[in-house]
Amino acid sequence: MLPTPTISVLMPVYNAGKHLRPAMDSILGQSFDDFEFLCVDDGSTDDSPAILTEYACRDPRVNVITKSNGGVTSALNAGLKVARGEFIARMDADDIAIPDRFAAQLEHFREHPECVAVGCHVMMMDANGVDTERTNPITTHEEITASLWEGHGGALPHFGAMMRRAAVEKIRLYREQFRTAQDLDLFLRLSEVGRLGNVPRILMRYRVHEGSVGAARSQEQARNAREILRQAYERRGQKLPRRLKNWDNLVVTTNRLKWGWEAVKAGRFPDARTHAWGVLRRKPFRRYAWQLAFHAVLGSQRERARALYRAVRKMAGRGPHPPAPADTLNHKPG
């Protein structure tokens, strides 16, 4: 009989072959190595199954679970049903864990026995693995739960979370009715049986690319999040606050603005136009949506147009072009 590991690492995999090796290497290279690595292949059609088999042959800690495609939530539950560790460590197949991630999160659990889930700070990176910006999530239970109750599941980064298995089993795992926004639902329910936290250190590198949950799922994700919030408030004997009743529309708009500016920055101008029109259909008077549409339509000529505009202003004696709004410069939604 195999000894019980301290941690069960849970990683759903679906057509992740392009980034799978670095993700797996980052787990197998952890400084704390008493874990089982549960890789749930959710019906991949690329070379992911072959890569998983290769790693399983090389390292006995890797356990490949194969199932027909059913989405991330069902894959997570499939792994949880065979997990043996005291703790569950989440991992995505395109991200990278810092070598001492597990050690740091376990130390947090030892210092905070009342904690049932802990995340971390995150370094964002692009599709090629180039670091872009760091995020510093709030750290206390009170701050995290307050943010969750406003619908912000990222208050505790799901892809870098570690949880007590007993607590996850107590709330009956993930709810498969939610194929997206399952992290918001999970953490709201976990907050009802214990405390949440974030280690104030960068322990994960999160990859942003076209395969991430994007516009194709954004409306479903927002609808699910709104229903999750409604149910959470109902469990407290309260009605969903008025400010959250149209929350799903706000989230879709905000996300599409963000993705649109990211597409402009990456030179994917057709994608940027799609996001801009998607926002304008909902919010025709949103100024930053029109700015996004303008840049997306200009496409590769946008810098030339900017230079021409500056030159015209200078010739007219109006001085240098004033700086653009901060939101535009940073490609963030208004």
Image (tube, helix red, strand yellow):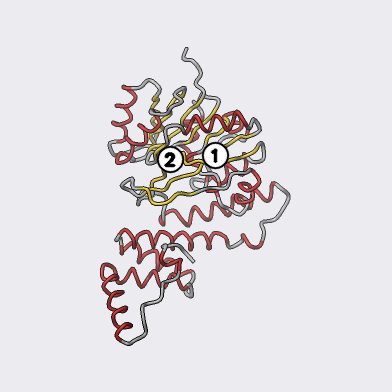
Residue at (26, 71) in percent of width and height = 301
Mark 2 crowdedness (10 Å alpha carbons): few <14, some 14-19, many ≥20: few
Relative image position of residue 183 (x, y in whole percent)? 53, 44
Relative image position of residue 291 (x, y in whole percent)? 40, 72
Residue at (29, 41) in percent of width and height = 18
**Residue lying farthest to the bottom in this orientation:** 316
- Distance between the Cα atoms at labels 1 and 2? 32 Å
Q: Earlier in the sequence, mark 1 or mark 2?
A: 2
Mark 1 crowdedness (10 Å alpha carbons): few <14, some 14-19, many ≥20: many
Relative image position of residue 249 (x, y in whole percent)? 53, 62
Residue 39 in the image: above or below residue 70: above
Residue at (54, 47) in percent of width and height = 137
Q: Which residue is mark 1?
A: 199
Is disc 1 placed on a helix, strand or loop? strand
Does residue 166 appear to the left or right of 51 in the view shown? Answer: right
Does residue 324 appear to the left or right of 171 in the view shown? Answer: left
Does residue 12 appear to the left or right of 269 in the view shown? Answer: right
| Of labels 1 and 2, the one closer to you | 1
Residue 125 in the image: above or below residue 110: below
Relative image position of residue 70 (x, y in whole percent)? 43, 40
Residue type, mark 1 in image: Val
**Residue lying farthest to the top in this orientation:** 1
Q: Which residue is mark 2?
A: 70
